[in-house]
Structure formats: structure tokens, C-alpha cells
Amino acid sequence: MRTRPWHPPDFDAPAHEVARRLIGAVLLVDGVGGRIVETEAYDREDPASHAFAGPTERNRAMFGPPGRAYVYRSYGIHWCLNFVCREAGHGAGVLIRAIEPLQGLDRMRERRGERIADKLLCAGPGRVGQALGIVHAFNGHRLDAPPFQVFSPVEADAEPPQVLQGPRIGISKAVEMPWRFGLAGSACLSRAFR
DNA sequence: GTAATGATAGCCT
DNA sequence: GGCTATCATTACT
């Protein structure tokens, strides 16, 4: 993969901005990962956000500095990965919902099952967590230090990705806030956009 | 193709 | 004690 002209993304911005910008970025965890094709934004003044009720033991990382991981257990089963954003202490994050696998396909299949189709390896937040080997120990870790690597496409780079926007999935509050973002035409989305 | 369902554990009221 | 930022499987249309 090229290392230039890519650069680390800026996480010090509102969650919905970071979520949109991350579409097309590349995420690797211990060398395993690919292109981010689906994200969701969760901000502090957002009833659907874990940060809405203020800091707790679980969401502590969301109130830390931006550019770090927030890892939580979903439905008692899955580990889901968020990128903390906004200024430190604000309590905002971006959920990584789907990735187009590019590197470490073998390790993804080991973790997810040999029979899984490539496009389903990381099509959903729980699947991303399993395929990339996300564990709770990564909670609060910097995203610019091992095992994480994140690269964003430079603005000037040829065609900017066409980004779709729609309502978030699996929530019951603030359903009307269209803070789900996806790469147009991607086969690796967890669900189609309308 | 969509719909229903169980698994499973930590969080918060 | 109720709910959940989900997934895989099964049973349908």
C-alpha cells in the first residue's frame, strides 16, 4: 500500500464531520484491516450516544483526548470499535461499522470462519471487531500507535469518495438524526442505504 | 429477498 | 430488572 500521499486524520472535530471524513480512510490493527466504508457519529448531546448521560466507567474513553479508541461490549457478545473525536472531555465518537478488507484476509478468516464471504468479513460493527481482533484491552489506546494505523486520503487526491448519508442502525432514540455514512457503491456495507 | 428468534453480559435505573 | 450502537440461523414470502 502507498504511504504517501496519505496522512493521519484530524479527530478534533464534531463527530458527524469526522464520521464523513473517515469514509475511504484505511484502518489497520496489527497489520489487518482495510478501507473504512461505513461509520456512525455519536455526540454528547445525542440521546442515542453512550456519552449522553455523562461519564461512566464504560464510556470513560469517550471523554478522554481525541484520536483514541473507545471499545465497548455490544449485546453481551461483540466488541465494537469507536474513534474518540472532538476536543478532550467532550464525549463524542465515531463507530466503525464496516470495512472493505484489504490486508490480512487470512487472519480475518481465521477469526471469523473460513467459509465467510470476503465482503461479509467486516460488514457490521461486531464483525469488524471480530475480524480485526479488537479486545477490551485496546480501550483508550492511541490510534497513531501500535497496533493501530489510520490513514486518510488527502483532499487533493483525484476523486473524493462519494459518501451516502442516512439514519443510524439499531438505536431507538434520536432515530431521525441522519448520522450514518457510507461509501457509495461499496459491496461491504452492513446494510444498503435508501 | 425479508422476518423472527435466541445467544449473552455488562450497564444503568 | 430492563435494555442494548449485533450476528447467525432458521423459516418463511
Image: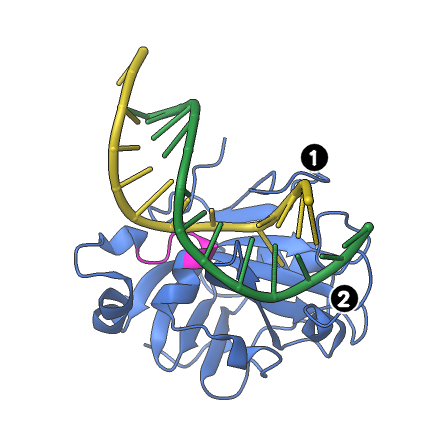
Chain colours: A blue, B green, C yellow
Residue A38 position, x and y percent, is 49, 52
Question: What range is drawn magenta here?
Answer: A121-126
- Bin the neighbour count of mark 1 within 10 Å (Cα to Cα): few under 14, some 14-19, many 20 and up: few
- Subunit ID for the residue under disc 1: A
Where is mark 2, residue-wise? A91
| Residue A120, placed above or below residue A31 | above
Which disc, if any, is residue A98?
Answer: none
Which disc, if any, is residue A176?
Answer: 1
Residue A54 position, x and y percent, is 82, 63
Seen from this angle, which residue lies furthest bottom? A146
**Residues indicated by labels 1 and 2 sit on the same polypeptide chain:** yes
| Residue A119, placed above or below residue C3 | below
- Subunit ID for the residue under disc 2: A
- Identify the residue shown where x is 81% and y is 57%: A53
Quadrant of the rendered image containing residue A31:
bottom left
Seen from this angle, which residue lies furthest left? A115
Q: Hey, what amino acid is under mark 2?
A: Gly
Residue A10 position, x and y percent, is 64, 73
Secondary structure mostly taken by the magenta-highlighted segment of the chain: loop
Q: Can residue A99 be seen in this view?
A: yes
Quick one: A134 or A22, which is closer to the camera? A134
- Label 2 sits on a secondary structure element that is loop
